[in-house]
Structure formats: C-alpha cells, structure tokens
Amino acid sequence: NSMKYDFDKIIERRGTGAIKTDILKERYGRDDLTALWVADMDFETPGFITDALKKRLEHSLYGYTAEPEEYWPTVMKWIKDHHQWEVKREWITYIPGIVKGIGMVINAMLEKDDKVIIQPPVYHPFRLIPQGNRREVVYNPLHENEDGSYSMDFDNLEAVCDDKCRLLILSNPHNPAGIVWPRETLERLASFCHKRGMIVISDEIHSDMALYGNKHIPFASVSPEAAACSITFGAPSKTFNIAGIVSSYAIVPSAELRERFFGWLHANEMNAAPLFSPIATIAAFRDGEEWRQQMLKYVEGNIDWLCGFCAENIPQIRPLKPQASFLVWLDCRSLGLGHDELVDLFVNKARLALNDGETFNPDGQGFMRLNVAVPRSVLREAMESLCEAYSLTLRS
C-alpha cells in the first residue's frame, strides 16, 4: 500500500457542524478566526475509512447490529504490534467516548466524598468531569524543568494525597505538553497508587502519535501493580481523525476492577458499539499504518517549521517540542502580557483561535496550546499574522 497521501490539501470545514469552525462566534466572540484549537486534525479522514463506511451504507438497512467478529482481534493486534502489550480479549470493551468514560468510572467506582487527583497543566475535562460530578479535585502540578519540559512531582503527590483520594487521572502521552512518560515514572506512579488502593485512569488517546522516535509505554504494561490498579482508555479517533465517530475502548486487566466497571457499563448498556464505530476502527487499524507514518512525518515537519519560525521571528514565544501528538504548548510568558491581553493578541489582533493556558491549569496563564495538524500553508499564514500583530502591539 505505497500510497502518497496529501496533507497540504485544504478542506473547508465551515458549515459542516465542525466544533472547531462552527462555534467560533459563541466561543471567541467572532468567527473570522483561523481555528487552531480543538484537538482534531484539518487533514482529510483517510479514504480507506470512508470506503469502509460507504460499503456499509450501500446496504440500506441500519438496524441493531452485533460487533463484527474481527473487531477486538484487530484492536488487540494493533496494540501488540505498536506497543508490545498483549491485551486479553476479556480485558477490553467498547465505551462511548473517553471523556464520558471518565465520568462513568467516577459514577460507577467512587463514593460521594472520594477525591480525584489530576496533574496540571492537563486536558481540562480531567478537572471539569469530577467537579461536575461533585467530587473534590486535588492538584498535583507537574514540575517545570529548566528547559521548559515537565516531570512528575512525586514529593508533592505524597503531600497532597490523603485517604479520600481514590482516583488519579493520568494523561499518557500528556496533553497539552506532549510528554511521552518514561517507564520509571510510570512504574513509580503505579507503585504509589497501588499501595494506597487508588485507581489510575490512563488516557492513552495520543498513544499512536509518538514523534521523533519517541516510544509510548502503556501504563498498565509497566508492572503487576500498574495492571492491578489501572483502567486504560484508547481510541483510533485522534490518530485517524474520526473523533465524530465515537470509537473508544477501555482495557482493564484486573478482574476485580472489571467486575465493578464492566458490570456497571453492561447494566447501563454503555458498552454497546453503534453501527459505524467498529467499521471505522477495523479499517483504521487494518489499513492505516502507511497513512499514520506519513501523517506523523508531516506533523513533525510542521513542528520543526514552527520552532524555527519562532526562534527567528518571535523568540518571546517558546514552543515546547512535543514528544507525541499535534498539540504544541507555547510558552508566551516572555511577551510580558496579562491573560486578557494575551488572548486579545491572539484572537482580536492576529485572528487566531487557540486554547489558552488557563483552560488547562487554573494558574496556567502565559501559555497557549496550538494545534499544528493543519496544512503547512495555514500554519505559516497564522504565525506570520501573529508576528505582525505582535510587532504592531509593540509599536503602539
């Protein structure tokens, strides 16, 4: 399958109901913005997925469906081939979305007064879901290293954790900082949580998008302790740009946790995959490797271009080079702007829609998250416009 895929192609998404483009007005107050926020890609969903869906659409009857026989074997083979993790069939089940999955774990597994630990700056639903389900959120912020990278702060984890902390939500790879967690960090986390009888949700949605030769390590695979206390979430949706086709799954090696969590899912029929999810998943994981490799190369090219551009033209913005995924955490603190001014610079002056740092961290001001999964021409125009807006700000 030596297809050459085209990632320079501009796909007009406005008017398709895309969250990224079609709710800009309500989210940013204006809709004349280049959308670089929501974490889906502006690259066309690959043809082998569309073809598989079309083939099913030709049979014009969309009744109740059973999961295709090759569904889970295909997923399990992909995980083994890419991450050397042997998942057993009974460990895995469909879930209707990873964010929803977090809410389900909280409702199925936690008491009313149990607390949830998160490690900001981190994907904001990790905070919003426990809060929305009336659980206290405990913060264990990542430690910022000299070079702008992050590591886990185990001393602080020890300090903030009490016996009401029953769940820790791990972003692996980490969003927004693009960290591929090292094995020893994951082992240490597993031992800490297992000892205290805490569950770890490992959100591994970006696992198939490690960059620059980095290697993703599934949390549950690092030790018997990790396997015993973990619920892992994964999906083909980020990698193959099919987030609108909800195709997530949960992997739970522990029989005890499975009985509780899968039992709850089953009782509420939350584990039943809708018609198109397995079809898209099978096509992605069966035919998608070539596309995935080319897409990641293109994303690396965009990141390299971005880092070079900032160094040369706007060194006050320091991109943290991600080890995984297409999200770049921009350190804008050297611009010397307050939160509102920073947002104003990006939105009203440069006409760009990014996620601001406070989304991911209550005290995360001075940062912006940039989605570089766009055609290079779009990224170039966006950054030139930012540069121009900043120099006008300086002049005024």
Image (tube, rainbow, N blue to C red):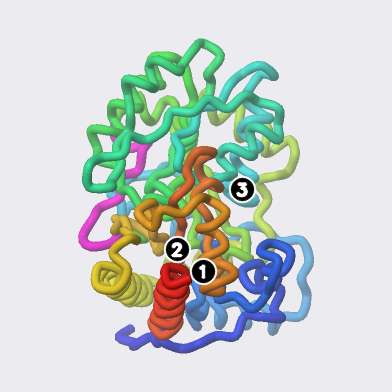
Q: Is residue 274 left or right of residue 396?
A: right
For image coordinates 37% across by 21% down, the residue present is 156
Any magenta on residue 212? yes
Measured as percent of width and height from the top left, residue 21 is found at: 64, 73
Pointer 1 local density, CA inside 10 Å: few below 14, some 14–19, many at least 20: many
Q: Indicate the secondary structure of the residue bearing disc 3.
A: strand
Marks 1 and 3: which is nearer the front?
1
Main secondary structure type of the part rendered in magenta: loop
Q: CA distance from mark 1 to mark 3?
A: 28 Å
Q: Is residue 241 visible?
A: yes
Residue segment shown in magenta: 211-222
| Residue at the spot of label 1 | 36
Q: CA distance from mark 2 to mark 1?
A: 6 Å
Disc 1 or 3, which lies upstream in sequence?
1
- The picture quadrant where one finds residue 217 is top left
- Give whichever of 92, 367 is nearer the camera: 367
- Quadrant placement of the N terminus: bottom left
| Residue at the spot of label 2 | 370
**Which residue appears farthest toward the top when viewing the image?**
163
Q: Is residue 133 left or right of residue 324?
A: right
Tell me which amino acid carries mark 1: Leu
Measured as percent of width and height from the top left, residue 134 is found at: 71, 27
- Give whichever of 285, 297 is nearer the camera: 297
Measured as percent of width and height from the top left, residue 54 is found at: 63, 82
| Residue at the spot of label 3 | 95
Disc 2 or 1, which lies upstream in sequence?
1
Disc 2 or 3, which lies upstream in sequence?
3
- Give whichever of 323, 31 is nearer the camera: 31
